[in-house]
Image (cartoon, helix red, strand yellow):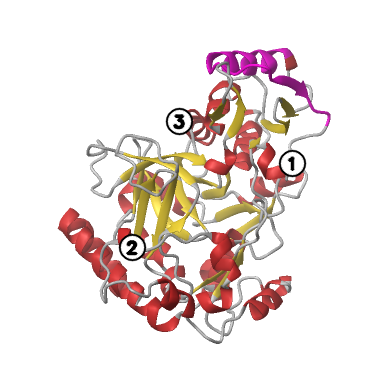
């Protein structure tokens, strides 16, 4: 199946927009029909719709709370139940093993108040490899040589425990491909930084991947000369990548930075290009930027949220699913030459800081704005802004002796430029902290702490 899908992926790129649109319509219609036949939830939700649906706008919107509340009715395999999945993920020894002998299972950390339980079939879990067959041009021959010179070794810096997607997917690959799996290793973010640096130096990876916040911290170690690795490729995830941070990672490691826009609901969603855009794999995924009323957002404007349809996963269909991200669709062809739709990602609406504005209302600020200001502070390896109340920002710093006056001045200037008023900026005693799944949020809005 994988070879056939890989050939189709390459043919799609050659056929251009018409071929992409045709496959998208066909796959959406097939998945909707399959969901209606096998999922009681979708059979009920889609009652009254046309027999064949090729336009996603005809479908009702779904979201995480509604789907998780109807878990047993949502899945299309009647053997899969929430109770069975909960029991499976309660056992850390089963990370990466096949649930019911067939499926990969992953969880989310539940920062928004609701933990996600995700069941993935073979077609979905193989899609990253399938679509990589047409992304080979992202690596030069020199990059390939550097990767091979380090034995193709891949270091994944992640939370070592739990069924989180990065860990479960890596464990699944190692179980399926024992020989290749020996070249892939998970490095715990729970290790003290000196120990983590020592382990990475000894492993000498050709590819380095992990949450963006951790990779930035490791870039500081590389710049200081304590970390001495030369990967060909660095793959950041878990947070929107700014141009400034991408350039810093590239320079620190002397590597190509391959950013991706992904979620557990759709791990293969989009890949980054050299122009700083993410190109959606729209033959297998549909991404609809919409406003707060779920009306289409014009190209060139930031959306309130975005609706995702993952066309590869049949066991747990995500169809017109509110992903919660604010994105902008590029209105013209991308200079990189790729034909797939290009988007930029501002971050999840949930991650935006809502602060008092000079006009008496509030203003929402993206985490990327703070990165632009604070990433240039000398010696600052990591920061975290915690909104402890509507008008207070607590600033966690690593290292703790970073010049506070410079950090406060940068934040004060940024807030003034955005016409934010009445906000107290205070220094925290505690260091930056991660979520249970290992993801690091540079900005923690008040709503995420309730």
Residue carrying label 2: 284
Quadrant the C terminus occupies: top right
* Mark 2 and mark 1: Cα distance apart in space: 35 Å
Number of disc labels: 3
Q: Looking at the image, do the residues carrying marks 2 and 1 touch, with CB atoms under 8 Å apart?
A: no
Position above or below: 224 against 130? above
Whether residue 312 appears in magenta in the rendering, the answer is no
Q: Earlier in the sequence, mark 2 or mark 3?
A: 3
Is 248 displayed left or right of 123 in the figure?
Answer: right
Q: Position of residue 142 (x, y in %)?
A: 37, 44
Find residue 101 and report its image quarter.
Answer: bottom right
Residue 56, horizontal then vertical, whole percent: 32, 61
Quadrant of the snapshot with the N terminus: bottom left
- Residue labelled with disc 1: 433
- 262 or 187, which lies in front? 262
Circle 2 residues within 10 Å: few <14, some 14–19, many ≥20: many
Q: Mark 1: give few (<14), some (14-19) or many (20+) Cα within 10 Å.
A: some
Establish if 193 lies above or below 116: above
Q: Is residue 427 magenta?
A: yes
- The residue labelled by disc 3 is 243
Q: x and y percent of residue 445 in the render? A: 65, 37
Magenta-highlighted residues: 405-429
The residue sitting at 37% across, 66% down in the picture is: 311
């Amino acid at each position: 199946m994988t070879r056939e899908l890989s050939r189709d992926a390459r043919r799609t790129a050659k056929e251009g927009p018409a071929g992409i649109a045709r496959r998208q319509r066909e796959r959406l219609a097939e998945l909707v029909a399959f969901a209606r036949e096998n999922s009681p939830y979708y059979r009920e939700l889609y009652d009254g719709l046309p027999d064949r649906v090729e336009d996603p706008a005809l479908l009702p919107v779904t979201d995480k709370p509604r789907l998780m509340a109807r878990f047993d009715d949502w899945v299309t395999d009647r053997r899969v139940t929430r109770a069975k999945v909960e029991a499976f993920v309660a056992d850390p020894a089963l990370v990466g093993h096949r649930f019911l002998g067939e499926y990969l299972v992953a969880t989310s950390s539940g920062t928004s108040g609701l933990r996600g339980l995700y069941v993935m079939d073979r077609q979905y879990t193989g899609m990253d490899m399938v679509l990589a067959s047409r992304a080979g041009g992202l690596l030069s021959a020199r990059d390939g040589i550097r990767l091979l010179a380090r034995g193709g070794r891949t270091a994944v810096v992640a939370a070592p425990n739990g069924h989180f997607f990065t860990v479960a997917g890596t464990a699944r690959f190692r179980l399926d491909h024992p020989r290749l799996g020996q070249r892939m290793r998970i490095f715990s973010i729970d290790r003290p930084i000196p120990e983590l640096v020592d382990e990475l130096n000894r492993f000498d990876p050709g590819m380095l991947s992990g949450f963006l916040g951790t990779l930035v911290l490791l870039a500081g170690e590389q710049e200081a000369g304590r970390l001495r690795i030369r990967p060909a490729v660095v793959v950041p995830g878990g947070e929107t990548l700014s141009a400034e941070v991408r350039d810093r990672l590239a320079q620190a490691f002397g590597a190509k930075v391959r950013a991706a826009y992904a979620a557990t609901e759709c791990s293969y969603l989009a890949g980054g290009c050299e122009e700083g855009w993410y190109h959606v794999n729209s033959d297998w995924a549909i991404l609809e930027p919409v406003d707060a009323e779920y009306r289409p957002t014009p190209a060139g404007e930031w959306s309130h949220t975005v609706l995702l349809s993952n066309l590869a996963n049949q066991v747990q269909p995500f169809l017109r699913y509110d992903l919660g991200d604010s994105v902008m669709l590029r209105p013209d062809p991308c200079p990189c030459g790729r034909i797939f739709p290009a988007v930029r990602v501002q971050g999840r609406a949930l991650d935006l800081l809502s602060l008092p504005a000079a006009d008496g209302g509030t203003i929402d600020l993206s985490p990327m704005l703070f990165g632009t200001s604070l990433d240039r502070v000398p010696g600052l390896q990591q920061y975290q802004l915690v909104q402890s109340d509507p008008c207070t920002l607590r600033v966690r710093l690593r290292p703790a002796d970073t010049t506070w006056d410079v950090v406060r001045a940068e934040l004060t200037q940024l807030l003034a430029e955005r016409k934010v008023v009445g906000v107290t900026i205070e220094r925290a005693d505690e260091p930056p902290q991660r979520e249970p799944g290992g993801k690091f949020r540079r900005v923690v809005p008040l709503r995420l702490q309730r």
